[in-house]
Amino acid sequence: MGVLVNPRTNYYYDNLIRYECLECEKGFIVGKYLSQNSDKDIICPYYHSDRVEADACSDDDLLERYQLGCLNLGYYKEK
C-alpha cells in the first residue's frame, strides 16, 4: 500500500518495483501504485519496449526503515 507520510494531505511514499527490459537488458524503477493502477502497459524508458519483467520490489517495512525522502516516489490517495 505504501507508507502514509502526511495524514492531512493523504500523501504516501510508494513501494518501488525494479523492472528489467528483455530487449535492452537495462533496469528501471516504477512506483507500485502507478504500475497497479495505470491502464497502460509498463514500457522501458530506454528501448520503448513492453517486454519487461519485474525482478525486485520494496515493501512498507523497507520504506519505513530506510526513509529515502526526496529519492522516493509518492502519490496522493483520495480520501
Image: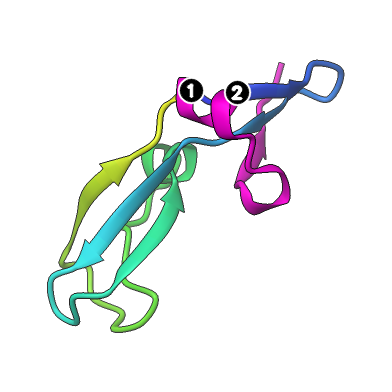
Depth order, front residue of 58/32: 58
Task: State which quadrant residue 79 falls in.
Answer: top right
Badge 2 crowding class, 10 Å Cα cut-off, few under 14, some 14 to 19, many 20 or more, is some
Give the residue at mark 1.
60
Q: Which circle's residue, 2 or 1, is located before the other in the chain?
A: 2
- Asked whether 63 falls inside the magenta stretch, the response is yes
* Residue 75 coordinates in the image, percent (x, y): 65, 38
Number of numbered labels in the structure image: 2
Q: Which residues are magenta?
A: 61-79
Q: In the drawing, does residue 22 fall left or right of residue 1?
A: left
Residue, x 66% and y 27% (percent of image)? 77
Depth order, front residue of 15/45: 15
Depth order, front residue of 33/71: 71
* Residue 19 coordinates in the image, percent (x, y): 28, 57
Q: Is residue 58 above or below residue 45?
A: above
- The local secondary structure at tag 1 comes to helix
Q: Amino acid at mark 2?
A: Val
Give the residue at mark 2.
3
Residue, x 72% and y 50% (percent of image)? 70
Depth order, front residue of 17/43: 17
Q: Is residue 68 above or below residue 60?
A: below
Does the residue at mark 2 contact the one at mark 1 (Cβ under 8 Å)?
yes
* Residue 36 coordinates in the image, percent (x, y): 37, 38
Task: State which quadrant residue 14 falls in.
Answer: top right
- The local secondary structure at tag 2 comes to strand
Q: Is residue 33 above or below residue 79?
A: below
Question: Which residue is the extreme one toward the right?
Answer: 8
* Residue 7 coordinates in the image, percent (x, y): 79, 16
Q: Amino acid at mark 1?
A: Asp
